[in-house]
Image (cartoon, rainbow, N blue to C red):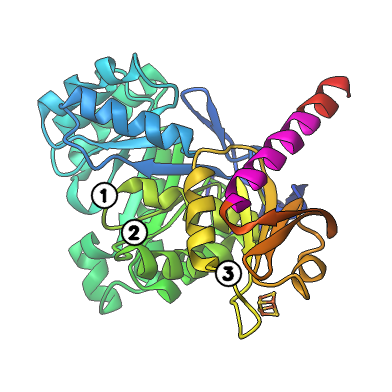
């Protein structure tokens, strides 16, 4: 519901140590978004959707890396009709991404999409009505995806460009239209490639509606550029308790999005998954090839789901002490090093055995943790 100074505006609840702004929960397939649900990690496939086996292969890899909801491009009827075949083979809900042609939204809903994403800037109101009706019948969530690159012409000209106020006006106008027609299973996104614009737009909209918000910086560039922009944009908003789902957009393999998205959530203590690597910048005391060690450990642990803090430090003098809070770590010496747990040295290890010793210890820790959680 739209509201201004309503009490819900300031309703907050604690979760994973972070105070989150209240949002009305919706279900995308079996995944709750908003309410007391954790912040959900999303991605989007880069394959041609109707190449079912390629699309499924990419989704399964993304699932293993922590993707919890997947969006698929639906540019034509074969893409919509591929949805049942894809859904049979994956384990996470599917959002169909629709532009321009409302008939594709109708087809995607018929074919079992759990949610659809529409852009009101390129889908006329007269067509939205039939989409709303179809979504209502099938209990499908609609994400109203506002994008700075495709705002309605009258809004663009009245604001003089794709400002944060323009994004908010576009979102509120569409929300009002949906509400007038009795449809409330809504999720909102207000994306811009400008980080400040995006932050301001989400801050403003979160004070005006209680619909769940999907956060993202759009057209964020390659991995480094996207990681920086997304960490700043998503990070600031999540820290303020704003945001129910996140996507880090990277030009390239969507698998690159996962460590960044989970890294942002982990850095803010919102959710923890996978290894957190702590490594020193090295200095004149370092006598091992630390960059290669970090790369190898990251590769070997790429599919690890359990959260562990792993330290890779350049020297024994400062390493174990500086990384005392790590679950396990290696600190290098001269052609050798030490394996340590929580700052306490376990044993001396030869340089060629760093990774294997570390993996062995990590397996032990995971077994111990699993045993503990079973006995609780
Ligand atoms: S841990 Fe040792 S090698 Fe690494 S930065 Fe600190 S002093 Fe230098």
Q: Is mark 1 within 8 Å of ligand 1?
A: no
Q: Which residues are magenta?
A: 353-369
Q: Which mark is residue 120?
A: 1
- CA distance for labels 2 and 3: 55 Å
The majority secondary structure of the magenta stretch comes to: helix
- CA distance for labels 1 and 2: 8 Å
Between residue 212 and residue 158, name the one nearer to us.
212
Regarding mark 1 in the picture, which secondary structure is present there?
helix
Give the x, y percent position of residue 28: 46, 29
Point out the tag, 1 or 2, that comes first from the N-terminus.
Answer: 1
Q: Residue at x 48, y 71 (%)?
A: 200
Q: Is residue 290 above or below residue 357?
A: below
The residue sitting at the bottom extreme is 284
Regarding mark 3 in the picture, which secondary structure is present there?
loop
Q: Which mark is residue 288?
A: 3
Q: Is mark 2 within 8 Å of ligand 1?
A: no
Point out the tag, 2 or 3, that comes first from the N-terminus.
Answer: 2
Give the x, y percent position of residue 57: 30, 28
Left or right of residue 122, residue 199 in this image: right
Q: Circle 2 is placed at which residue position?
A: 170
């Amino acid at each position: 519901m739209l509201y201004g100074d309503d009490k819900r505006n300031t309703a907050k609840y604690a979760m994973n140590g972070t105070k989150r702004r209240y949002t009305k929960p919706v279900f995308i397939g079996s995944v709750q978004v908003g309410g007391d649900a954790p912040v959900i990690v999303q991605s989007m496939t880069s394959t041609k959707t109707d190449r079912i086996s390629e699309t499924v292969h990419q989704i399964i890899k993304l699932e293993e890396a922590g993707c919890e909801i997947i969006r698929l491009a639906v540019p034509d009827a074969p893409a919509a009709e591929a949805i049942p075949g894809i859904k049979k083979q994956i384990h996470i809900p599917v959002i169909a991404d629709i532009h321009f042609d409302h008939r594709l939204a109708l087809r995607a809903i018929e074919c079992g999409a759990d949610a659809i994403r529409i852009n009101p800037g390129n889908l006329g109101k007269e067509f939205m009505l039939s989409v709303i009706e179809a979504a209502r019948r099938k209990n499908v969530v609609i994400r109203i995806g506002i994008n700075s690159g495709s705002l309605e012409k009258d809004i663009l000209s009245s604001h003089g460009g794709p400002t944060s106020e323009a994004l908010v006006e576009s979102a509120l106008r569409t929300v009002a239209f949906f509400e007038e027609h009795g449809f409330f299973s809504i999720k909102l996104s207000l994306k811009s490639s400008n980080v400040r614009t995006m932050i301001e737009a989400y801050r403003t909209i979160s004070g005006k509606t209680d619909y769940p918000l999907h956060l993202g910086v759009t057209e964020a560039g390659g991995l480094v550029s996207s990681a920086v922009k997304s960490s700043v944009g998503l990070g600031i908003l999540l820290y303020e308790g704003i945001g129910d789902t996140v996507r880090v957009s990277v030009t390239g393999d969507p698998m690159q999005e996962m460590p960044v998205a989970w890294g942002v959530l982990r850095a803010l203590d919102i959710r923890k998954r996978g290894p957190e690597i702590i490594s020193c910048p090295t200095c004149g005391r370092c006598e091992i090839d630390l960059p290669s060690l970090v790369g190898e450990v990251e590769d070997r642990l790429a599919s690890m789901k359990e959260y562990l803090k792993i330290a890779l430090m350049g020297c024994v003098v400062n390493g174990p002490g500086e990384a005392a809070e790590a679950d396990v770590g290696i600190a290098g010496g001269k052609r050798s090093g030490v394996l340590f747990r929580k700052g306490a040295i376990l044993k001396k290890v030869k340089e060629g055995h760093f990774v294997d010793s570390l993996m062995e210890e990590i397996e032990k820790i995971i077994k111990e943790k699993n045993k503990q959680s079973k006995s609780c």
